[in-house]
Image (cartoon, rainbow, N blue to C red):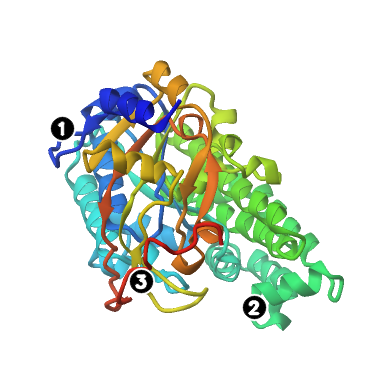
């Protein structure tokens, strides 16, 4: 089907987003009884993605009884936020609760949009009716191997000093790498050093063997503490494997990371079900993690992702939402570990979903596929889709930031916001990159 005909199909089936609280009524209705709502983002540094995602999440918590927000962040960092929103920490503000997000890229979670949502979540929990469970905030990622090791030991120090001593001894296997996970991964992956695999597996096994004893010491608080410690111990086990795999190829490490995030989501769902008889969870991650990998070129590289794994495990219970934008600004770095910059986002490339949506006309709209199979059939087929992570290199736009995707199979609904702006980091003002890359920049590099 030619683009003109596709534009006509989209125009007849979209829902305009005008800034009204009722804009997403249709979307909330489409979600229906789904227990897992996966809300993506096309970049890690766009204000409108964070803000719109938060507004949808608030309604799911208030109107549909969702109990958790699970995000692309490490467990111990997010756990400090969880304690704050439940009124169980000494932090006196959302910004203070976000203090553990210190590794690159800090702006991904330490930004004003997240701060505002955390403030709302604390207020919601404080003022909810007694019969309604609290809503929590949890991390799914696995980069915090060293912090999680320390958290396991800290937990055991408090309740079982002898087990804490054994945990220190096991985890000391990593000590001569000076806290450098990648140095460990390279040495162990290439056989230059013994791996710590047996030690981290033994520690997780030992912790789980004492589960009943540890969880029944101080009621529900003890259950919370044990569950968190168990997730940290499992994170250490999976992170150890992940860092060893980094040097075997992209597909291997990508799959290990997304498998860990899906496993953590499943563990969280099971825990919520035991505690509250309900396991409704909203997930916040990048489009590339939450859109079904089977509908993209990722699958041809042997990669899967959280979106695919959750759909496979919970058929009929999952609803995933993607975001796109045509142009604007974004907070991103030029290189890994670099400073946050406000960068100009080049207009969507020719042949991309972003360009097609821009041509439709209305600047902001929602397009639902799940409730309109006719639209899905007419829009079926692959086009380029943009993905900006924490690094944005407009000079290599096509190679660095686009992949082929069938959007109608990748997501159940897509929100297009034509012109967007960068998130505002809490720590420092982002440096402005002057001047947009011209539209004539070669698209094939």
Is the residue 256 above or below the residue 380 in the image?
below
Q: Quadrant of residue 109?
A: bottom left
**Where's the C terminus, which quadrant?**
bottom right
Distance Cα–Cα, label 3 vs label 2: 21 Å
Label 3 secondary element: loop
Q: Quadrant of residue 39?
A: top left
Q: Which residue does the numbered mark 1 point to in the structure image? A: 22
Q: Quadrant of residue 357?
A: top left
Q: Tag count in the figure?
A: 3
Marks 2 and 1: which is nearer the front? 1
Q: Position of residue 136 (x, y in %)?
A: 36, 47
Residue 440 visible: yes
Is the residue 281 above or below the residue 190 in the image?
above
Going by the image, does 3 lie left or right of 274?
left
Q: Position of residue 289 (x, y in %)?
A: 52, 47
**Where's the N terminus, which quadrant?**
top left
Q: Which residue does the numbered mark 2 point to in the structure image? A: 180
Label 1 secondary element: loop
């Amino acid at each position: 089907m030619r683009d003109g005909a596709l534009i006509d199909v989209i125009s007849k089936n979209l829902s305009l987003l005008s800034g009204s609280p009722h804009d997403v009524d249709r979307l909330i209705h489409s979600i229906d009884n789904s227990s897992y709502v996966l809300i993506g983002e096309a970049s890690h540094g766009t204000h409108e993605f964070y803000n719109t995602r938060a507004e949808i999440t608030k309604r799911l918590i208030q109107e549909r009884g969702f109990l958790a927000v699970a995000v692309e962040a490490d467990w111990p960092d997010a756990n400090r936020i969880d304690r704050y929103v439940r009124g169980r920490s000494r932090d006196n503000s959302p910004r203070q609760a976000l203090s553990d997000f210190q590794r690159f890229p800090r702006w991904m979670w330490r930004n004003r949009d997240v701060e505002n949502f955390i403030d709302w979540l604390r207020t919601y929990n404080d003022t909810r009716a007694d019969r309604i469970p609290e809503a929590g905030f949890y991390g799914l990622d696995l980069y915090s191997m060293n912090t999680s090791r320390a958290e396991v030991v800290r937990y055991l120090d408090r309740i079982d000093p002898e087990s804490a001593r054994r945990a220190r001894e096991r985890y000391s296997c990593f000590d001569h790498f000076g806290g450098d996970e990648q140095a460990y991964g390279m040495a162990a992956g290439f056989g230059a050093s013994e791996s710590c695999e047996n030690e981290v597996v033994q520690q997780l096994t030992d912790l789980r063997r004492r589960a009943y004893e540890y969880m029944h010491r101080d009621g529900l608080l003890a259950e919370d503490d044990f569950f968190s410690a168990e997730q940290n111990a499992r994170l250490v086990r999976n992170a150890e494997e992940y860092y060893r795999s980094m040097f075997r190829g992209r597909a291997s490490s990508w799959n290990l990371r997304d498998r860990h995030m899906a496993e953590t989501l499943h563990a969280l769902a099971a825990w919520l079900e035991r505690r509250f008889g309900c396991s409704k969870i909203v997930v916040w991650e990048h489009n590339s993690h939450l859109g079904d990998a089977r509908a993209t070129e990722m699958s041809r590289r042997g990669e899967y992702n959280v979106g695919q794994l959750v759909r496979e495990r919970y058929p009929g219970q999952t609803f995933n939402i993607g975001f796109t934008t045509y142009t604007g600004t974004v907070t991103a770095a030029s290189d890994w570990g670099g400073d946050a910059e406000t960068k100009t986002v080049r207009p969507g490339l020719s042949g991309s979903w972003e360009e097609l949506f821009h041509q439709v006309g209305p600047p902001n709209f929602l397009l639902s596929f799940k409730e309109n199979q006719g639209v899905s059939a007419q829009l079926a087929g692959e086009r380029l889709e943009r993905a900006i992570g924490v690094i944005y290199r407009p000079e290599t736009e096509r190679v660095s930031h686009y992949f082929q995707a069938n959007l109608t199979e990748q997501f159940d609904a897509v929100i297009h916001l034509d012109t967007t702006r960068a998130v505002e980091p809490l720590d420092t003002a982002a440096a402005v990159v002057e001047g947009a890359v011209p539209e004539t920049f070669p698209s094939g590099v």
